[in-house]
Image (cartoon, rainbow, N blue to C red):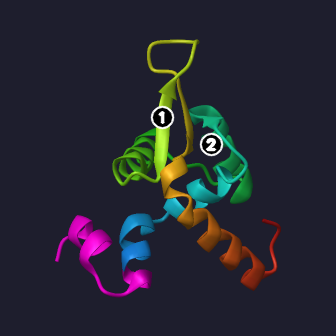
């Protein structure tokens, strides 16, 4: 079963969640957006700071954001500042992943 089918058809909610958020950076991106919209450069900087300086390449970050937008977990709006300037935010109708992220943070003892 391909990822998009797993995300909607798998009987287990953990499998569905993992199909949508699997990958090296997707959960971290969702975590960084927990307090609201951010620009691409702010997300890139936050991910670098969270890993102690290890940076994510622009190509990989763009792909991960595109996947999350395509899955309906994030929305992207154009902002002033250039043709490609976008602000990314959690999608309101898909707020459930935020609850999952808060539960993971409580379990791990990290600030939510």
Q: Label 1: few (<14), some or many (≥20) within 10 Å?
A: some
Whether tag 1 and tag 2 are in contact, CB under 8 A, the answer is no
Which residue lies at the image location 68% right of the left edge and 77% below the top edge? 103
Give the magenta range. 1-15
Residue named by callout 2? 43
Which residue lies at the image location 48% right of the left edge and 40% below the top edge? 75
Residue 36 image-quadrant placement:
top right
Q: Where residue 50 sits in the image (x, y, percent)?
A: 72, 57
Camera-side residue of 52 and 81: 81
Q: For the residue labelled by badge 1, is the local secondary structure a helix, a strand or a loop?
A: strand
Q: Report the quarter where the N terminus lies.
A: bottom left
> Does 109 sit left or right of 93 as displayed?
right
> In the rendered image of this protein, does residue 52 appear above or below residue 45?
below
Q: For the residue labelled by badge 2, is the local secondary structure a helix, a strand or a loop?
A: helix
> In the rendered image of this protein, does residue 21 appear above or below residue 88?
below
The reply to whether the magenta stretch includes residue 3 is yes
Which residue lies at the image location 28% right of the left edge and 81% below the top edge? 10
> In the rendered image of this protein, does residue 51 appear above or below residue 82?
below
Residue named by callout 1? 76
Residue 25 visible from this viewpoint: no
Residue at the extreme front of the image, as rendered: 93
Which residue lies at the image location 51% right of the left edge and 47% below the top edge? 91
| C-alpha gap between disc 1 and disc 2 | 13 Å
Residue 62 image-quadrant placement:
top left
Residue 77 visible from this viewpoint: yes
Q: Report the quarter where the C terminus lies.
A: bottom right
> Does 15 sit left or right of 78 as displayed?
left
């Amino acid at each position: 079963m391909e990822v998009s089918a797993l995300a909607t058809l798998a009987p287990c909610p953990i499998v569905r969640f993992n199909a949508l958020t699997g990958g090296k950076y997707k959960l971290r991106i969702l975590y960084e957006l927990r307090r609201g919209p951010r620009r691409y450069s702010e997300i890139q900087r936050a991910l670098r700071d969270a890993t102690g300086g290890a940076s994510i390449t622009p190509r990989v970050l763009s792909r991960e954001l595109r996947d999350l937008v395509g899955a309906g977990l994030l929305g992207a709006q154009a902002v002033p500042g250039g043709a490609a300037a976008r602000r990314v935010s959690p999608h309101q109708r898909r707020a459930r992943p935020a609850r999952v992220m808060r539960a993971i943070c409580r379990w791990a003892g990290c600030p939510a």
